[in-house]
Image (cartoon, rainbow, N blue to C red):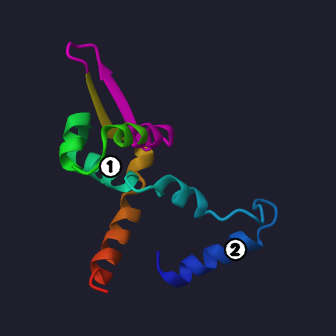
Amino acid sequence: MNIPNLQELMAKNLNNKENCNPNYNPLDPVFNVLQGKWKNQVLFEIIALKSARFGQLTRAIPKITNTMLSTTLRELEKDGLITRKQYNEIPLRVEYSITEKGKDLLPVYYEMYKWGIKYQKE
């Protein structure tokens, strides 16, 4: 979507009083889901690995604590961006994978990635 179309869409939504709460910004849920120090990195690793186990994530993100990784995974699952699959094995095996809702964020991540590359040296 190019910028003029985005501006038109935003103006149309802001002027549509029937379906729009004047205090609501459609970007709020996006930022609420993606806020936090570790959420984006954990989600990025799960996307890159297709599915990931807890140990794989701790190795991929060495600075995250086990407690923070557990909390972040629970939040991403609660937000519907990842699924948690537990296998009835000994030792216990749990895998995390991206959901369709999470996959819908891929174009957003791609655009943010391009923006980061473009401006990383500033």
Identify the residue position indicated by label 2 in the image: 12
**Magenta-span inclusion, residue 86:** yes
Say whether residue 23 is left or right of residue 101: right
In this view, 65 is above or below 53: below
Q: Secondary structure at mark 1?
A: helix
Residue 54 visible (yes or no): yes
Seen from this angle, which residue lies furthest bottom?
A: 122
Residue 53 visible (yes or no): no
Expressed as whole percent of the image width and height from the top left, the position of residue 64 reads 30, 48
Identify the residue position indicated by label 1 in the image: 42
Give the foreground label among 1 and 2.
1
Lower sequence index among marks 1 and 2: 2
In this view, 66 is above or below 37: above
The span picked out in magenta is 72-92
Going 42% across and 53% down the picture, which residue do you hit? Answer: 104
Going 36% across and 63% down the picture, which residue do you hit? Answer: 109
Expressed as whole percent of the image width and height from the top left, the position of residue 58 reads 23, 42
**Magenta-span inclusion, residue 118:** no
Identify the image quadrant of the C terminus: bottom left
Quarter assignment of residue 106: bottom left
